[in-house]
Image: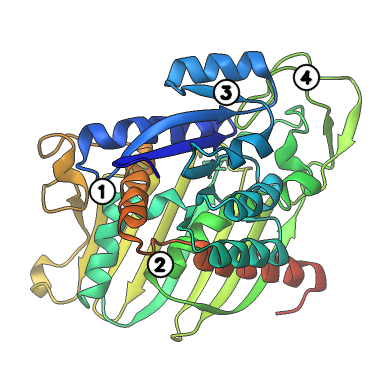
Amino acid sequence: MASKELRVAIIGYQFMGKAHSNAWSQAARFFDLPLKPVLQVACGRNETALRAFADNWGWQNVETDWRKAVERDDVDVVDVSLPQHLHHEVAIAAARAGKHLFCEKPMALKVSDAEAMLQAAEEAKVTHYVNHNYRRTPAVRLARQLIDEGKIGRIFHWRGAYQQDWIVDPEFPLTWHLRKETAGSGPHGDLNSHSVDLAHYLVGDIKTVSCLTTNFIKERPLPGQGAATFSAGTGGAAARGEVTVEDASLMMVEFANGAIGSFEATRFAPGRKNRNTFEIYGSEGSIAFDLERMNELQFHSRNDPEHAQGFRTILATESCHPYIKHWWPPGHIIGYEHEFTHAVVDFVDAVAHGAPIEPNFHDGLKCIRVLEAGLKSAASGRR
Ligand code: SOE
């Protein structure tokens, strides 16, 4: 590793490629980092699009062959910003080349792939991280702090709902998200992976799962130009293809600590653009979060004087709140992209100190186990 530098290769340049590039370039501007991230190499298959991406974000080199990118001697970290079916092969090759791993969620398509990724990372003794970015929202960190302080007591209920609406139109094309071979599953994997990770973080391990999935639109037009996450693109084909993942999932779980929980994940909730909500109810109080109001946390305490009880809204933008003092003065809200920057900050710290970071490949695997159990339950009708 170059002294005081951490040289990154990013593989993938779409939505997550941009979110991660922004984080790698912002982190050292706002936070004191033990190592300075260097945007060393960007990698993708379409050279023209890749060069435009690299020029825009300041990546110093480009590679169109991911194997060359992950094996370069001038790279310390491989950032896997690819669709999930490609994580496994790239992450394992990068670990074997001795690179630290910053990997997009969900970690893998299936448990066996996630296990192999964890094994490769552990054998290589590299730092490994799965980017469940919502853990690093200051209001979510505050929720964890209140739980650790016993402010809501023994937890009884988790209620998570992650809702979007970008494929409600039956003419939205059959992008990679809607095919089993590339996405593994639909919103159950894409969205519930976030909720399950948050539930693991805030409530604890999940013991049993029962799940129901359904598919509302069976066939869609094949995609044309520019079809991507949230975008129909143009010039879709007249030919249609089969949707091979679920459109919505409802899952019920028992946690090891005795709490019970529900998870709802859908892309068929008109008006809900990217609404990631959770509610946690305990013996001493309750907590509620809504990503569409991500700087706020709702908190109710049964220990407040009876006449003053009710949900209060805490604006998690004071300097006492996690990460906030590095940004703007109090009350100057932050956004989605800041979660990614916080992840980079903690990742750089972990690499510099040889310390683990969460969620890592153990946590990513645990999440995939729950999701895979959910799909098995949905297919078999059994708990
Ligand atoms: C698409 O559904 C998506 O981009 C997810 O893949 C992300 O993880 C989520 O944060 C926003 O929605």
**Whether residue 347 is visible:** yes
The residue pinned by badge 3 equals 62
- Of the numbered discs 1 and 2, the one sitting upstream in the chain is 2
Q: Which amino acid does label 4 sit on?
A: Gly
Q: Which residue is drawn at 37% across and 48% down?
A: 343
* Disc 1/disc 2 C-alpha distance (Å): 18 Å
Sequence-first tag of 2 and 4: 2
Callout 4: SS: loop
* Residue 247 visible from this viewpoint: no
- What color scheme is it? rainbow
Tell me the residue that label 1 is attached to: 296
State how far apart marks 1 and 3 are (Cα): 40 Å
Residue 137 in the image: above or below residue 52 = below
**Looking at the picture, does residue 307 appear above or below residue 154?**
above
The answer to which of marks 3 and 2 sits earlier in the sequence is 3
Q: What element carries label 1?
A: strand
Distance between mark 2 and mark 4 Cα atoms: 39 Å
Residue type at numbered disc 2: Tyr
Picture disc at residue 224: 4
Does label 1 or label 3 sit earlier along the sequence?
Answer: 3
Q: Where is residue 305 in the image (x, y as percent from the top left)?
A: 8, 73
Residue topped by disc 2: 201
Q: How crowded is mark 1: few (under 14 residues within 10 Å), some or many (20 or more)?
A: many
